[in-house]
Image (cartoon, helix red, strand yellow):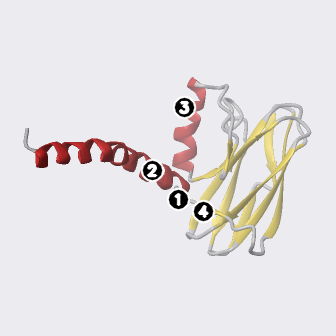
């Protein structure tokens, strides 16, 4: 084999790990910039309006209080979540279509728990926060996707003007 060909093969072998890693690094960096229909995770360095959301159940109904929130496009909200109920509950922020599709997946995998930038699962007495910037106008929702909870009334509306 000519020396030039051997050198070219050696260079290709040396660079192979880098070329294989490139798609993986692009995928990982894409995950950091995941887009959401309801906006994007907030910036802790910027001011936010606090909206307290309580989750609970009573007399067979499950609820969020409040069950309706209005925000301005571009506004950043710090959702302070508290589960005052006796059961686990979730707060998942998305479009109605996205939440309905995810709720169907939850029926197949009810053990799935959320601790995401747009959703949290809380046990009884627990509290957490979600910082969110509403960069898009429209109608969105927050819902509990634990099987049976949405159907029992655990859904709230967000209007972004």
- Name the spot of residue 30 as percent of width and height, x first: 47, 54
Residue nearer the viewer, 103 or 76: 76
Left or right of residue 114: residue 60 = right
What numbered label is drawn on residue 25?
A: 2
Q: CA distance from mark 4 to mark 2?
A: 22 Å
Q: Quadrant of the N terminus?
A: top left
Q: Crowding near pointer 2: few (<14 within 10 Å), some, many (20+)?
A: few
Q: Say what secondary structure mark 2 lies in.
A: helix
Q: Give the number of the mark in front: 1 or 2.
A: 2
Q: CA distance from mark 3 to mark 1?
A: 23 Å
Q: Residue at x 18, y 48 (%)?
A: 8
Q: Crowding near pointer 3: few (<14 within 10 Å), some, many (20+)?
A: some
Q: Give the number of the mark in front: 4 or 2.
A: 2
Q: Crowding near pointer 4: few (<14 within 10 Å), some, many (20+)?
A: some
Q: Earlier in the sequence, mark 3 or mark 4?
A: 4
Q: Give the number of the mark in front: 4 or 1.
A: 1
Q: Give the number of the mark in front: 3 or 2.
A: 2
- Name the spot of residue 28 as percent of width and height, x first: 49, 49
Q: CA distance from mark 1 to mark 2?
A: 13 Å
Picture quadrant where residue 74 is located: bottom right
Q: Give the number of the mark in front: 3 or 4.
A: 4
Q: Earlier in the sequence, mark 4 or mark 2?
A: 2
Q: Give the number of the mark in front: 3 or 1.
A: 1
- Residue that carries the numbered disc 3 in the rendered image: 105
What numbered label is drawn on residue 40?
A: 4
- Residue that carries the numbered disc 1 in the rendered image: 33
Residue nearer the viewer, 34 or 61: 34
């Amino acid at each position: 084999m000519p020396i030039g060909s051997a050198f070219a093969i050696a260079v290709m072998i040396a660079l192979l790990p880098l070329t294989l890693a490139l798609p993986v690094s692009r995928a990982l960096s894409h995950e950091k910039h995941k887009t959401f229909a309801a906006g994007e995770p907030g910036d802790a360095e910027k001011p936010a309006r606090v909206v307290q959301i309580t989750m609970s159940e009573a007399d067979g109904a499950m609820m969020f209080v409040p069950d309706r929130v209005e925000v301005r496009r571009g506004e950043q909200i710090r959702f302070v979540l508290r589960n005052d109920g006796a059961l686990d509950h979730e707060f998942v922020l998305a479009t109605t279509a996205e939440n309905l599709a995810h709720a169907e997946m939850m029926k197949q995998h009810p053990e799935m728990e959320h601790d995401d930038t747009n959703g949290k699962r809380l046990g009884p007495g627990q509290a957490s926060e979600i910082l969110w910037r509403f960069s898009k106008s429209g109608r969105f929702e927050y819902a509990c996707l634990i099987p049976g909870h949405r159907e029992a009334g655990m859904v709230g509306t967000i209007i972004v003007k």
